[in-house]
């Protein structure tokens, strides 16, 4: 990872210090997991399930994405998912729209940074 990529990840809400610590300071391994994150379907499924008012499925998508984002130290996504998961857990569906818009903005920003900078290609 070059310094530009690292700065962009930090700007997009990634706690790079924590992330790299979790990956034993192996930047290549961390980058591999970021690239794999591009294929994670939980955000797409969350959006679809919220639109269809399938809240139990949306809860599972949000909860899974929250775990992945926590493990990768994607704080800008994780912090919003914490709110969404709690709203879904307590059946407070009316409050999700604002949080989801923020999640979508943060998610798209991060995906763009990964796509633009990653030197790795998906193997699948």
Image (cartoon, rainbow, N blue to C red):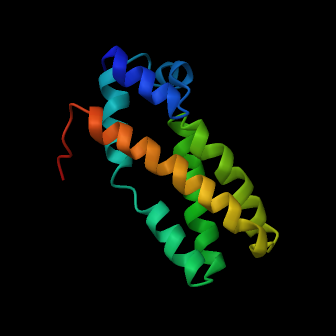
29, above or below 103, in the image: above
| Quarter of the view holding residue 99 | bottom right
Question: Does 95 sit left or right of 74 as displayed?
Answer: right
State left or right for residue 115 relative to residue 91.
Answer: left
Q: Residue at x 37, y 37 (%)?
A: 113
State which quadrant residue 32 falls in. Answer: top left
Measured as percent of width and height from the top left, residue 65 is found at 54, 54
Position of residue 83 measured from the top left corner of the image (x, y, whole percent): 74, 54
Which of 27 and 93 lies nearest the eye of the viewer? 93
How many numbered circles does the render carry? Answer: 0
In front of the other: 112 or 41: 112
Q: Nearer the viewer, residue 13 or 35?
A: 13
- State whether residue 17 is above or below residue 11: above
* Residue 95 picture quarter: bottom right
Q: Tell whether 58 sits left or right of 10.
A: right
Return the x and y of residue 70 as percentages of the image width and height: 58, 40
Q: Is residue 104 left or right of residue 80?
A: left
Q: Quadrant of the N terminus?
A: top left
Pick the residue in front: 10 or 28.
10
Q: Residue at x 41, y 21 (%)?
A: 6
Name the residue: 50% across, 36% down.
Answer: 72
Residue that appears at 33% across and 55% down: 39
Q: Position of residue 63 (x, y in %)?
A: 62, 58
Decide: is 50 above or below 17: below
């Amino acid at each position: 990872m070059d310094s530009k990529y690292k700065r962009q990840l930090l700007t997009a809400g990634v706690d790079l210090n924590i992330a790299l610590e979790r990956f034993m300071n192996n930047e290549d391994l961390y980058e591999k997991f970021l690239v794999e994150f591009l294929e994670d379907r939980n955000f797409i499924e969350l959006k679809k399930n919220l639109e269809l008012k399938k809240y139990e499925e949306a809860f599972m998508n949000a909860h899974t994405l929250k775990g992945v984002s926590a493990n990768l130290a994607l704080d800008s996504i994780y912090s919003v998912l914490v709110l969404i998961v709690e709203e879904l857990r307590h059946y407070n569906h009316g409050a999700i729209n604002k949080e989801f818009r923020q999640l979508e903005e943060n998610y798209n920003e991060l995906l763009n940074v990964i796509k633009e900078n990653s030197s790795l290609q998906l193997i699948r």
